[in-house]
Image (spheres, rainbow, N blue to C red):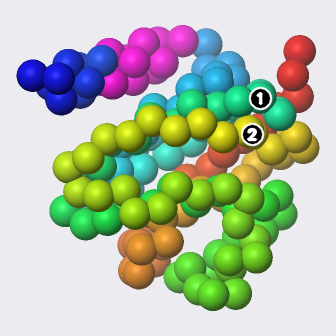
Amino acid sequence: MRKKLVVIGFLLALLLASCGAGGPSTTIDVATTDFAFTPNTFTVPAGEEITLNVINNGAVVHNFVILKLGTSVGDAFGDEDQENVFWEERDIQPGSDLSVTFTAPAEPGEYQVVCRTAGHVASGMVGKLTVVAGE
């Protein structure tokens, strides 16, 4: 029952977010599947505490990795990309949901978001985090 309420709440939050003005938010609600983030673009205020709510609707483990400004991965996330990680939540298990917080980058710009699970970047599991200056 609790899980159904969480899923309903998450879907309601997605619906309300899609009706909004599209401005920055301190909450990111995202669903992972094989092989996508839904939605795959996010806008947050610079330097603010952000709550990430993830539901893994996929059949395998997923990750939510934010790369540093001006960096991106090629066709796959490799060891050489680790130094470019700004923040990450790893090993989100299939069928699970979680809520964590992190501090958004202080510098406005566009940051690449990827799933580091093997084959997922090449399959298109990428997104974009846009950080905007606070008001």
Q: The disc labelled 1 sits on which kind of residue?
A: Glu
Q: Is residue 16 magenta?
A: yes
Question: Is residue 7 placed above or below 73 in the rendered structure?
Answer: above
Kindly indicate whether the residue at mark 1 contacts the one at mark 2 (C-beta within 8 angstroms). yes
The residue wearing badge 2 is 104
The residue wearing badge 1 is 48
- Residues drawn in magenta: 10-20
Q: Say which quadrant the N terminus sits in.
A: top left
Q: Name the one closer to the observer, 113 or 64.
A: 64
Judge the density around disc 2: few (<14), some (14-19), many (≥20) Cα neighbours within 10 Å. many
Residue sticking out furthest to the bottom: 79
N-terminal-most mark, 2 or 1: 1
- Seen at 54% across and 12% down, the residue is 20
Question: Is residue 72 placed above or below 54 in the rendered structure?
Answer: below
Q: In the image, 47: left or right of 15?
A: right
Question: Distance from label 2 to label 1 (Cα)?
Answer: 5 Å
Where is residue 60? Give x, y as percent: 25, 66
- Seen at 26% across and 24% down, the residue is 6
Can residue 33 be seen by looking at this rendering? no
